[in-house]
Image (spheres, rainbow, N blue to C red):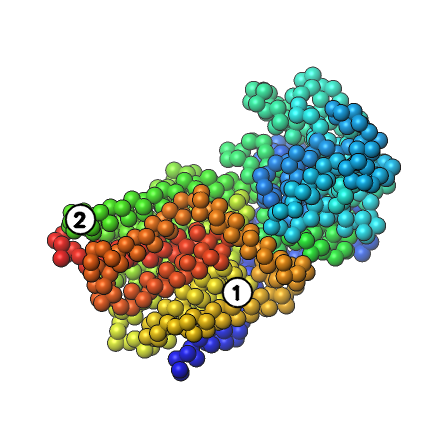
Amino acid sequence: MIKLKFLALPILFLLLLPWPEVSWAGADGISPVAPRKGEHKPQEMRFPPEPGKMVLILLDRSSIGDLNENDLPNIEILARSGAIALMNSNTAGVNSTDNTHATIGAGGPVLAAGTAPMAYMAEDTTIPEQKPAAGEYYRRTGDLPPDGSIVQLGIARIHRLNAKTPYPSRPGALGDALGEAGLSTAVLGNADGVQGPRRNGVLVAMNNLGLVDGGVVNDELLQSDPTFPGGQRTNYEALWNQFQQVYNNFDFIVVELGDLSRIEDARDQYFDAVIRQQRLATLQRSDDFVGRVLTLIDRETDMLIMLAPTPGGNTLEHENFLPPVIMSGSGIQPGLLISPTTKRPGIIKNMDIAPTVLAYYGLPQKPEFIGRAVQMMPGNYTLAQLQDLQQGLALTYKARSSFLRNYVLAQLILLGLSLFFIFKNSASGVSFLKPFWLAVMTVPLVLLLITLLPQPNLIVLIIEVLVLTALLTWLTLTISRNKILAPFLLICGATVSLILLDIMLGSPLMKSSLLGYDPIVGARFYGIGNEYMGVLIGSVIIGATALTHSFQRYRGPLLAVIGLIFLFTMYAVASPGYGTNVGGTIAAAGGFLITMLLLLNIKITSRIVGLVAAGIGSTVLAFMAYDLTRPVELQSHIGRTANLILACGPEEIGKIITRKWEMNIKLVRYTIWSRIFLASLGALALLFYFPVGVMQSIKDNYPDLYKGFIGVVTGSILAFLFNDSGVVAAATAMVYGAPPMIYLILAERYTEGTPK
């Protein structure tokens, strides 16, 4: 009974620990040209008490290379006087132009597929039906639009598209919030081209009923140009004239320049040289327009944002995955933009734009906004540095899938060969296979270490991984000197130490690792991702149980030390200031508690399982409660999720569970990680029965390690159940389940190439 009190220790320990904030120093390797006091620390923007106009210029389908590599003096002035960043443009579906623009206007991921052509000025007629837009809006909504307004005729479709998504986002939430505050909205320009009408800007400024207060989005702002793709482009003189009128009469103004979108829509019909020439001419015309806008707006009270909602324009060596955004004007100093959503200097999300607009006007944030108002990191950062960051992220993104696929494939091949030799009871090839299993366990460590090396291209990256893996495997075998568990101690000890150190420093290595999280994919931007969460859980358990087996005479003190290591690891994974991974907390707590109970020789009963579950739940709730006490801009996604549940009600829990399971089911079906996870579980299950006695031999000879295998499997299954990409975490945890077990079986059954 006394031993059961150990179950209360994790909660008590975690609650007594200090709760630090994320360290920002040196993040992402972006260093300012001229460091100044306060840099590397995010600062809230200080907007004027009486804000002026908010102007949002959409230079859609532009890239950071477009802005950095061409002579665009006005945009250069805008960038040097303002704050810059790359922007993740993910939506609730594909990154089509209508989805990306609607997501900005919703402050969260939404769908609007096929609706960009359905926006009209109320007095215009629809294309090609030639029906009055106002009358068509009335037929579809039951309301007459105000005179002079712009209508989105696809608003009912947009609501239906989003009715079944698991996100709380509401289309048009930004327009609603501005309208409720008595602020007027306007849209100028379009991207009409070879594919017909394209009025994407309306999706940004509209309210929940699909209405914008005013503006011009028809062909009045177009001019004929026989040299331009499609024969029509933006009439910048007409656009400037309209802008001056709108500027005096409206508060929030969206300007869609449109020409780059027209070029990209027609790209397949033109030679690359023509596309490059037209893009350059378009960028120069856009730059001239930006210069005119800068002469009109009041930099002391107004705010100007220029961004590309949709990635496009293959003008870089790598694809333009993360388009640029520049903010200038009131309350903004030169520097990098940073968001509480990403906590990564120089990277924000598209859903952060709407909360930033509300923050500028001093309006309260909407609970349906998933994004957060951006902040600044003052410093003399340049577009060139931002382009270097983008290219580094693109290299990691492009290398990630192919490398990890081959890594998993190698494990499957090794698993098949090992089972063949075990079942055949053949010694042939065993000595050859054992080092490869150690190499498999070494790879996650290598993928952290190589981020410290220069990686100019994909070939160099692959060579670095192969060479360092081979070197560390050889070094492990050399140091181990035929001590069978020493390789596990060395590999797991080094892996755990480096991951925990990296988390404490703000995850600088994990952010750039092939096994880390990816800003382009956008599933996670800070803390510990599911891949390394699984690695950490598996390596901690196997390293700890190998340690107790190897030093039995110190078993009592070692168990106390291991308990503290387990607790600290749980804290690192769960803390909103460090790992901030709820699913990882559940998986770690379950795996660690089961392992510790087994090491303490406590029989696992239904009562014990209930106590373990209660301990896990209390730990998670404690972290949520703490995160809720912090300011909104400092909260991690743990606190934001709790806030969302409090604001939207318990039904939001069901949506979160649905979203996670939908992602899990999708990954199980399509990701190769599910193959190695299921194959590893199947192999371990098979080895329980055949060859007869093989698993019993491991249990008898390495009882602590055997208990560790049970802990790894427990943590792996919990990771699968409680994470939205749980199969990935489960598979990486099993890297320290199946490989060590098979390594031991090979070592146990064969000595110097002879079957035992």
Residue 201: percent from left, percent from top: 72, 37
What residue is pinned by disc 2?
424
Query: For residue 457, which numbered disc appears in the image?
Result: none
Which corner quadrant holds the N terminus?
bottom left
How crowded pointer 2 is (Cα within 10 Å; few <14, some 14-19, many 20+) is rated as: few
Residue at the spot 26% in from the left edge and 73% down from the top edge: 552
Residue at the spot 47% in from the left edge and 76% down from the top edge: 8
Residue 140: percent from left, percent from top: 77, 37
Query: For residue 575, which numbered disc appears in the image?
Result: 1
Determine the image quadrant of residue 124.
Answer: top right
Of callouts 2 and 1, the N-terminal one: 2
Q: Is residue 608 above or below residue 671?
A: below
Three-letter code for the amino acid on which mark 2 is drawn: Lys
Q: Secondary structure at mark 2?
A: helix
How crowded pointer 1 is (Cα within 10 Å; few <14, some 14-19, many 20+) is rated as: many
Residue 496: percent from left, percent from top: 39, 61
Residue at the spot 70% in from the left edge and 31% down from the top edge: 117
Three-letter code for the amino acid on which mark 1 is drawn: Ser
